[in-house]
Amino acid sequence: MLIKMIRQTVFLSAICILIVPACAGTSPSSSSNAASAPGYAQQATEGVQTLQQWYVQGSGLYAAPSGWWNAANAMTVLANYSRVTASTQYLPAIANTFTQAQTAHANFLNLYDDDEGWWALAWIDAYDLTGNLAYLTMAETIFADISTEWDTTTCGGGVWWKKPADYKNAIANELFLAVAASLANRTTGTASASYLAWAQKEWTWFKASGMINSQNLVNDGLTSTNPTACVNNGRTTWSYNQGVILGGLVELAKADQDPTLLPQAESIANAAIAHLTVNGILVDPSVSGGDTPQFKGVFVRNLMALYAAAPNPQFKTFVDSNANSIWTNDQGPKYQFGALWQGPFDSADATRQTSALDALVAAAAMQ
């Protein structure tokens, strides 16, 4: 199969690194002015170094409580950070995870289609960064497995969240869209056409499924008590459900030039900014457990992708505000970041760190 070598090069303007008024390894006071902080790229550099203190070389994963899918998001952060800062420091870690993590799950496959989608996107990002075809091929292998989960008997389409046949929800289908459209943009010929057809099929089903509510927010999934008449289940409009769909629509718009897709993405992004924030800072209803602390970063990461495709000053202002708040209000010792971006710092782990880094990297990319 012929492969397009698509590179997403991000050019940064010069970043002025200012002196932090607090000693290294201590938290700045809540009254610190964002202007006294280092530039976003330097903030991300400090934060990534801290993230990697939780990295386990032997497994290619991160120390508990960070889990399997969280590690995929950490790989995406390492790839995005490397691209934005032109750093090669963490390429060995990405390569190590590609090898070592398969000891746990061969080809990054397991019972959860959303887990598989996260890993597919991580290896697509790694391919964009390095041009290593092994990463792209792995994403294709993962996609092939998820595609077997497409089912029309329940809700008329969509992939399942978990094998076998457990829950038609937003995140698994958003990831399926994002991976399909991304592969369409990175392959050629019949392969590209097939991925594009899958992406268009997924989006046609998703937008008619009822999961996008009257506020232009995406609820968690569908109630399928009557499998021929599924309805929005009204469950939480998590920030990451508003995020992944943005990235999927951006990739699909690149692939098929449909002029309706970016406006749809902007509507969802604007709704999230309007309804899922407190004083301009992104807030989820819960940041407990091993999953929810990851969510906010996923939204901001995909907002970065939408901004690159359709620049909107409101998006930059929003990302800057969240990055500044993380640095000023949600920083613990040694450049650790917590789950409450509005503050105060709660605790540290690789999941919280990865999510906050999504915001810092996005802020650096938008400069």
Image (cartoon, rainbow, N blue to C red):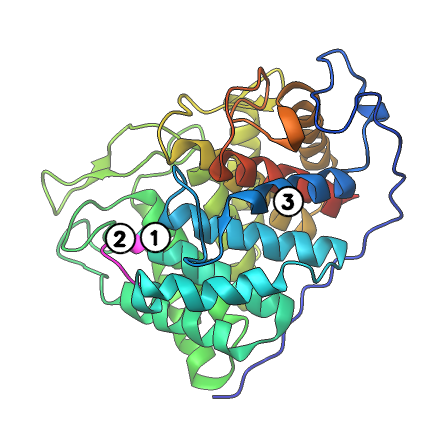
* Cβ–Cβ under 8 Å for marks 2 and 1: yes
The image quadrant that residue 218 belongs to is top left
Q: Earlier in the sequence, mark 3 or mark 2?
A: 3
The image quadrant that residue 120 belongs to is bottom left
Q: x, y (%) of residue 200?
A: 40, 63
Pick the front one: 37 or 120 = 37
Q: Residue at x 70, y 62 (%)?
A: 88
First to last magenta residue range: 109-113
Identify residue for label 1: 115
* Cβ–Cβ under 8 Å for marks 1 and 3: no
Amino acid at circle 2: Tyr
Q: Residue at x 54, y 38 (%)?
A: 355
Amino acid at circle 1: Asp
Q: Quadrant of the C terminus?
A: top right
Cα–Cα gap, marks 1 and 3: 23 Å
Identify residue for label 3: 48
Q: Earlier in the sequence, mark 1 or mark 3?
A: 3
Pick the front one: 252 or 175 = 175
Our reading of the magenta stretch's main secondary structure is: loop
* Cβ–Cβ under 8 Å for marks 3 and 2: no
- Judging from the image, what secondary structure is the residue with disc 3 in? helix
Amino acid at circle 3: Val
- Judging from the image, what secondary structure is the residue with disc 1 in? helix
In the rendered image, is residue 362 in sight? no
Q: x, y (%) of residue 25?
A: 70, 28
Residue 338 located within the stretch drawn in magenta: no
Cα–Cα gap, marks 3 and 2: 28 Å
Residue 110 located within the stretch drawn in magenta: yes
Indicate whether 243 appears above or below 103.
above
The image quadrant that residue 342 belongs to is top right
245 horizontally vs 210: left or right? right
Identify residue for label 2: 112
